[in-house]
Amino acid sequence: MRSTTPREKFRAVLSGERCVHPGSVYDPISARIAEDLGFEVGMFAGSVASMAVLGAPDLIVLTLSEFADQARRICRAGSLPLMVDADHGYGNALNVKRTVEELEVAGISGLSIEDTVLPRPFGSGGKTELLSIEEGVGKMKAAVAGRSDPGLCIFGRTSAAGITGTEDCIARVKAYQDTGVDAIFLVGVKDRAQLEAIAAETRLPLMLGGAGKAMMDKDYLASQGVRICLQGHQPFAAGVQAVYATLKALRDGVAPADLPGVASAELMKQVTRGDDYDRWTRDFLD
């Protein structure tokens, strides 16, 4: 019997009736942990990618090839459907098309292209600005054109809800859904009233990012067509804290055997798929 592919699993989430929280992942080990714990979807964010690959803040200094390479490493480590934040597509609409082509080959299940002006332009003073709707539409069309596997899901992402307001957000959602994208990724929705107003104007499933604590009711979100809702990217920050604390303890003279919070040999064998490698070693080397 043919197994269900990650992209089929991902589309089942979008076409379902539930809202899920994805597991924030950044490398093969974190993706395997999320898969072992039962997360339906993994999320590889641009901000986390910049930190994990470059050790740099989220200022759009990561390149497409660096991002795609890390996504490929994550995807080959297991069968967790991976959603990625492809930022602005690394350039104009032609770059967006190339971005989709590269990430599709990397094995991801879904990606978002946003309508934010990125990277930060000269003289902006740090103010977040949006592309014109017309340029945003061009990017979404290019993203759809760049896809060769119809199983790959493309999300049109907009931050208009928190920047220019509900009316502009609705206009962008309507325009983007007409380009053939599979879902809409909303960032910065302020409250339930705003979400309900936007959700009423689209036929596509929604993804939510940057929502406040008062919005975090999965049953309510599901009723509004939200199928994926981000909770943040705490696993990476927790990993940084653990490495820092461990190295500091060693530097301060704590004996390795006395270190707290170190993964057991059993857990390390699980996340590295040690049993599989033992079996392959017997089958192919012994």
Image: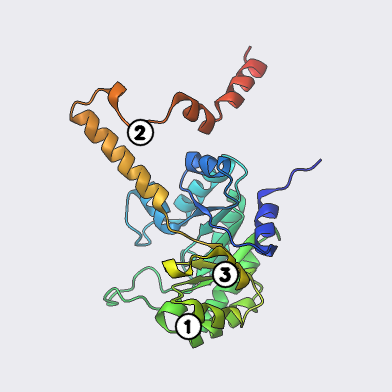
Name the kind of residue labelled 1 in the image. Ser
Provide the residue designation for mark 1.
Answer: 132
Name the N-terminal-most of marks 2 and 1. 1
- In this rendering, is residue 200 above or below 184? below
The disc placed on residue 261 is 2
Q: Residue at 65% of width from left, 18% of height from top?
A: 284
> Which residue of the protein is positioned furthest toward the left in this rendering?
252
Q: Is residue 193 above or below residue 142?
A: below
Which quarter shows the C terminus? top right
Q: Quadrant of the N terminus?
A: top right
CA–CA distance between discs 3 and 1? 32 Å
Where is mark 3, residue-wise? 220
Residue 178: % across, % down: 65, 79
Assess disc 2: are there few (<14), some (14-19) or many (≥20) residues with their C-alpha within 10 Å of its C-alpha: few
Whole-angstrom CA distance, mark 3 to mark 2, is: 36 Å
| Residue 125 location, quadrant | bottom left
- Look at the picture and state if 16 lies above or below 129: above
First in sequence: mark 3 vs mark 1:
1
Question: Which x, y percent locates residue 87?
Answer: 46, 64
- State which tag comes first along the sequence, 3 or 2: 3
Give the residue type at disc 2: Gly
